[in-house]
Amino acid sequence: MRPITQVAAQAGIDPDELEPYGRYRAKVDLAILDRLADRPDGKLVITTAITPTKAGEGKTTTSISLAQGLGRLGRRVMLCLREPSMGPVFGIKGGGTGGGRAQIVPMEEINLHLNGDFHAVAAAHNLLAAAIDASIFHGNPLGIDPQTVSWPRTLDVNDRALRHTVIGLGGKVHGVPRENEFVIVAASEIMAILALADDLHDLRARLGRIVVASTHDGSPVTAEDLRVAGAMTVIMRDAVKPNLVQTLEGQPVLLHAGPFGNIAHANNSIIEDRIALKLADIVVTEAGFASDLGFQKFCDIVCRLGGFRPSAAVLVTTVRATKSHGGVAFEDLGREDLEALRRGAENLAAHVGIVRRYGLPCVVSINAFPTDTPSELDLARELAAAAGASTVVVNRGFAEGGAGAVELAEAVLAACEEPNDFRQLTPDGAPLEEQIAAIATQLYGADGVDYLPQAVRDLERMHALGFGTLPVCMAKTHLSLSHDPTLVNRPSGFRLPIRGLVPSAGAGFVVALCGDMQRMPGLGRQPNFVHVDIDDQGQTVGLF
């Protein structure tokens, strides 16, 4: 690794704008935006993928290798990513730093609470939770109806036992008993606020707008009402600064915020993107999960609130994942099966269609695996082109680093010069119902939307609170284009059930809960943490 001061200097970050955390990572002071205010923005490229499968797609690996490939071509490039949550690091997914020769480093520090941002989010979130219960306990001066408290507690661990809890047990001295829940830190509204804030003062204003409960007469109760938003901001004052690291080949990488793609809005911070666009000619960023989740939210939420206009999209697929959608069992994915590839390409075609629906050129990147045969790669190219991709390339970044991604980098540069008709799915100010219907029918392929009784009540409340035209953030499974994780490939003939709507007033959107989506994941039978330990020299092993 190169000293982070060298990486910063190469990127155009002045020494007084850099706050090192050791030799290989740092934070970037927001004053850089004032210095660079008059500099034109670079081009923005968003990486997304087909519906995830157990076979893996390699979206982060592709994003990193693309940045490395652009570096090989001599382009001034910067990569923008989210920070990994320790929930999936120790759960089923593992780390979020790429793989093979396409990685960002230092891997261990990045995967394990990089520079403390997740801890700051958790502390601010739980301070607000404590303030609510303290106010109720001390005479309830705001008139909070305890049955309406919607603000959970949070923890950066997958723990299904905390999804539904009872707090305040043990008698009067220990609080007022009520039901409560935990969400993972990546699903906290404060994480979304961190990702969408313009600066520290905007962060303060957004934290104050968080709605946590209702009074007995139905009026909303906010963090500002509880007089806790200022203290929450102080906790977050360092977390608002993005983090600087590097790829294995030395390209600068900004990491900031970490909202999940299936239960939050799935993208890194607006601050991070703005800094990168001023520093680089090409900025590569990545949205969580597939185009129906992270990409849709990037276009309809992040671009709308941040004022961004992307130049192109990269859609990641693999032969293995496509065959998985075609019905091949995991243990058989290494065998050539052209018919399964044809069947599974329906999922790829759906995602190409989603990208094109937003008016962007779509470069399909086939992330190569050693088991791919020439016939399968040729057919995958043919099927992606037939689906409407602007260009289709095979990316070998995992095995070869930037050298294996030069063709992808050239394709992306060409796509950035194509005509661009970027547009949101629905116009500004569209009602929640119109947004949800458009996402469900035009992107997911649903026949319509069904609102469960609680969702009907929630819709009425959203409109009464003045939230009826905020952007919608869909919370649904990432394993299917539908709400049902068992419906793989390109499902049809289904209706999308909405079981509830939750206001994220500080973030500036409304979360629509689809199906059985939970905001606190659980651990599997054999989590990744069983592999993690220290060796005889005290070095970490098994973290990947």
Image (tube, rainbow, N blue to C red):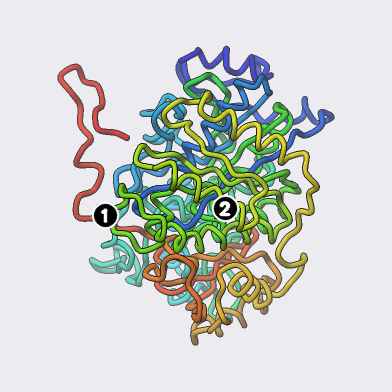
From the top left corner, tell me how far across and down residue 112 is, in percent.
37, 34
Q: Secondary structure at mark 2?
A: helix
Residue behind mark 1: 523
Report how many numbered discs are placed on residues in the image.
Answer: 2
Residue lying furthest bottom in this view? 453
User: Residue at horizontal 63%, vertical 27%?
Assistant: 29
Of the pair 453 and 75, the residue shown nearer to us: 75
Residue behind mark 2: 384
Q: Quadrant of residue 252?
A: top right
Mark in front: 2 vs 1: 2
Q: Which mark is residue 542?
A: none
User: Residue at horizontal 48%, vertical 78%?
Assistant: 499
Q: Secondary structure at mark 1?
A: loop
Of the pair 336 and 461, the residue shown nearer to us: 336
For residue 3, above or below residue 155: above
From the top left corner, tell me how far across and down residue 422 is, in percent.
76, 54
For residue 472, above or below residue 108: below
From the top left corner, tell me how far across and down residue 309 is, in percent.
75, 47
Of the pair 439 and 90, the residue shown nearer to us: 439
Mark 2 surroundings: few (<14), some (14-19) or many (≥20) residues within 10 A: many
Q: Quadrant of residue 35?
A: top right
Q: Quadrant of the C terminus?
A: top left
Mark 1 surroundings: few (<14), some (14-19) or many (≥20) residues within 10 A: some
